[in-house]
């Protein structure tokens, strides 16, 4: 039920990005009230200008609210008995509009619930007022019901959420086409109301939100502006854990890597995790994919702040003031997964803690206020809530890479420094890195026996220094696909990014917040924190010279680095055979790579050396992508 056009021409729903308004309101001590909900809805309406509409002013890009489960309200309005709060899950379901199809979808959902050894307590019709909708929003509007589920074996809270996670994923995968069903939320801790609405329409459409019995100690609200993309009911925010302002410009690579490492994922907390694959839903927006990976990391055992810092690390590589323990924390997790780079400001909550983090670029403003009646208000701009200045005891803005966190269970605001130092002390990350990672620069040039001192103090100063050539931006040559001349395969591909108003960023001008380093070696289980995860080779720069390549090829010649054993595979094909010969060569290369890995190789070097008039190199982009997708 994505309600998005199919990929056609230059449009593809995978390129969906958001640029929006986001805010949260929370009582520090976790005291639930309808006033918190009303304040959040007021903040949402104040951000109407951050959302968008088309020619129909009544059809918005999206608006929504996330709140705690209003147990007293549900206990009063349902015609079936509910167990205690935390012992059941509730989800808002977007069902087919056709009554017959909706009935079939509900029956299928109940069947999957039973197969997962859970129990359907009942369904509730969600009262809505579609008279406020524009024609476009009404045309694709689903029907709305809430399902209530518990576990006969007695699991509660996050343990129940883990089972509901697999249940929801199965429903998403198995109910397709005309029975497609989408759950904005299915949890024992939080509930979402959202849709293809303008900000004032949210409360008018979902009449539950006007009921005084709807109470929560925290709310997270969002007004969506979809950047050059299509609005839809499911892609409105908040998602199950986040609301996001900005765009994830690395999202395609992030999704591909998550898909690649799924075969390695395992956790005792979710025994049947493979039923949730693929983790990143095909056709979802960048924010939706971010939320799905965050959900996985959190439900597999990490706290929500921990998972957030894995995905949005601060600029640690070139910081001269960061503690060694915190640096080790980021470096270790950098070997587990790549960052999800913005610009982005992401607010997050699990129903107990709520917070926000700004990515390392700091290009999406977020400001917060703390009042003398124990409220914390965060928003993407000032003025979303009318607060008497005399009541404000503290105010500030999120800084690049920093986190704001409120823990309602502890009844306090936790500082960025405390969060990160506490997480960094959970495991012996420094020890794991020292024992596991190998720096390329520390591999000795064994052929001539030079020491590091000789290289640094004698040879290097005698070599001539070079600088990068200066060139102008732009090109007047036709794009490769329209060119009448043969072009390199590389010319047919370009870096993908969201076209928005950001200042120029590169590793020279923004040295403090950028990094060009990477790691090379075997991937491990993302969901397990062990020393095995960081047994990799550290590359300070993505381009390596011949000497460094020789080090990599011969890294285990003396059997000192079995976990980094390398294998060179030739990437040549017989020119006379044309395209069929290249295809056959790629098949042979893929087989050779698999055999090498079975034989213990952990680094594969694809070589185009020794090419001549008989054997030509396969284009490196085609060669590496063929091997990558094969693996």
Image (cartoon, rainbow, N blue to C red):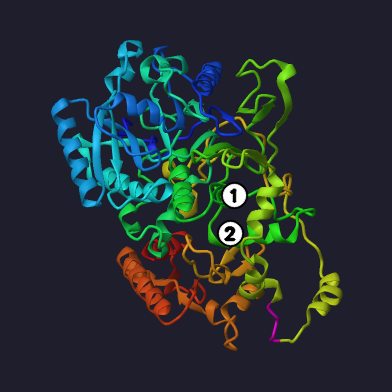
| Location of residue 139 in the rendering, given as x and y in whole percent from the top left corner | 27, 19
Name the residue nearer the viewer: 146 or 46: 146
Quadrant (top left, top right, bottom left, bottom right) of the C terminus: bottom left
| Vertical order, 31 against 163 (above or below) | above
Secondary structure, magenta segment, majority class: loop
Q: Which mark is residue 150?
A: none
Circles 2 and 1, Cβ within 8 Å, touching? The answer is yes
Instruction: Name which residue lies at 59% across and 30% down.
Output: 27
Asked where in the image residue 626 lies, by quadrant, the reply is bottom left
> Neighbour class for label 2 at 10 Å: few (<14), some, many (≥20)?
many
The residue wearing badge 2 is 333
Instruction: Name which residue lies at 25% across and 51% down.
Output: 116
The residue wearing badge 1 is 309
* Left or right: residue 628 compared with residue 543: left
Residue 231 seen in this snapshot: no
Instruction: Name which residue lies at 24% across and 27% down.
Output: 79
Quadrant (top left, top right, bottom left, bottom right) of the N terminus: top left
| Vertical order, 7 against 552 (above or below) | above
Name the residue nearer the viewer: 423 or 117: 117
| Vertical order, 21 against 334 (above or below) | above
> Neighbour class for label 1 at 10 Å: few (<14), some, many (≥20)?
many
Residue 446 within the magenta-colored segment of the rendering: yes
Residue 482 within the magenta-colored segment of the rendering: no
* Left or right: residue 37 compared with residue 579: right
**Which sits earlier in the primary sequence, circle 2 or circle 1?**
1
């Amino acid at each position: 039920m994505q309600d998005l056009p199919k990929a056609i021409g230059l449009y593809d729903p995978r390129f969906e990005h958001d640029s929006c308004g986001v805010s949260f309101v929370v009582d520090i001590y976790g005291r639930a009230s309808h006033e918190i909900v009303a304040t959040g809805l007021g903040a949402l309406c104040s951000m109407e200008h951050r959302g968008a509409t088309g020619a129909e002013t009544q059809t918005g890009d999206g608006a929504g609210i996330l709140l705690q489960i209003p147990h007293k309200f549900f206990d009063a309005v349902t015609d079936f008995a509910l167990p205690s709060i935390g012992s059941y899950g509730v989800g808002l379901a977007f069902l087919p509009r056709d009554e017959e199809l909706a009935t079939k979808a509900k029956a299928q959902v109940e069947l999957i619930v039973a197969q997962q050894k859970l129990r359907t307590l009942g369904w509730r019709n969600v009262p809505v007022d579609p008279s406020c909708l524009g024609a476009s929003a009404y045309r694709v509007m689903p029907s709305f019901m809430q399902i209530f589920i518990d576990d006969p074996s007695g699991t509660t809270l996050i343990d129940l959420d883990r089972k509901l996670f697999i249940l929801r994923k199965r429903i998403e995968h198995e109910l397709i086409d005309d029975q497609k069903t989408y759950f904005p939320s299915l949890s024992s801790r939080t509930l979402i109301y959202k849709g293809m609405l303008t900000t004032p329409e949210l409360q008018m459409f979902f009449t539950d939100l006007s009921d005084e019995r709807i109470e929560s100690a925290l709310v997270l609200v969002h007004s969506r502006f979809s950047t050059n993309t299509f609005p839809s009911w499911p892609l409105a925010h908040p998602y199950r854990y986040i609301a996001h302002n900005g765009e994830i410009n690395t999202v395609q690579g992030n999704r591909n890597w998550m898909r690649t490492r799924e075969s390695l994922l395992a956790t005792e907390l979710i025994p049947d995790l493979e039923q949730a694959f693929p983790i990143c839903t095909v056709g979802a927006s960048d924010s939706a994919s971010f939320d799905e990976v965050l959900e996985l990391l959190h439900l597999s055992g990490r706290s929500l702040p921990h998972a957030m810092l894995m995905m949005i690390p601060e600029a640690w590589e070139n910081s001269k003031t960061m503690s060694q323990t915190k640096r080790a924390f980021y470096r270790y997790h950098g070997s587990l997964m790549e960052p999800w780079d913005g610009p982005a400001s992401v607010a997050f909550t699990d129903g107990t803690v709520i917070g926000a983090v700004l990515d390392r670029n700091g290009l999406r403003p977020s400001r917060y206020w703390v009042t003398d009646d124990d409220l914390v208000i965060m928003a993407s701009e000032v003025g979303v809530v009318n607060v008497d200045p005399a009541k404000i005891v503290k105010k500030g803005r999120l800084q690049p890479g920093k986190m704001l966190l409120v823990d309602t269970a502890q009844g306090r605001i936790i500082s960025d420094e405390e969060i990160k130092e506490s997480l960094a002390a959970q495991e012996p990350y420094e020890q794991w890195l020292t024992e596991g990672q190998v720096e390329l620069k520390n591999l000795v040039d064994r052929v001539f026996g030079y020491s590091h001192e000789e290289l640094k103090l004698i040879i290097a100063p005698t070599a001539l220094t070079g600088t990068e050539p200066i060139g102008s931006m732009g090109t007047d040559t036709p794009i490769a696909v329209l060119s009448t001349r043969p072009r390199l395969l590389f010319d047919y591909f370009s870096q993908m990014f969201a076209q928005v108003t950001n200042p120029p960023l590169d590793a020279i001008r923004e040295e403090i917040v950028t990094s060009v380093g990477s790691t090379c070696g075997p991937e491990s289980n993302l969901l397990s924190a062990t020393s095995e995860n960081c047994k990799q080779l550290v590359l300070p720069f993505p381009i390596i010279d011949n000497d460094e390549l020789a080090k990599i090829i011969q890294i285990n010649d003396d059997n000192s680095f079995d976990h980094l054993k390398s294998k060179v595979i030739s990437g040549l094909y017989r020119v006379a055979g044309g395209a069929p010969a290249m295809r056959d060569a790629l098949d042979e290369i893929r087989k050779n790579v698999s055999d090498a890995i079975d034989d213990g190789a952990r680094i594969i070097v694809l070589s185009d050396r020794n090419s001549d008039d008989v054997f030509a190199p396969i284009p490196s982009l085609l060669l590496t992508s063929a091997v990558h997708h094969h693996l």
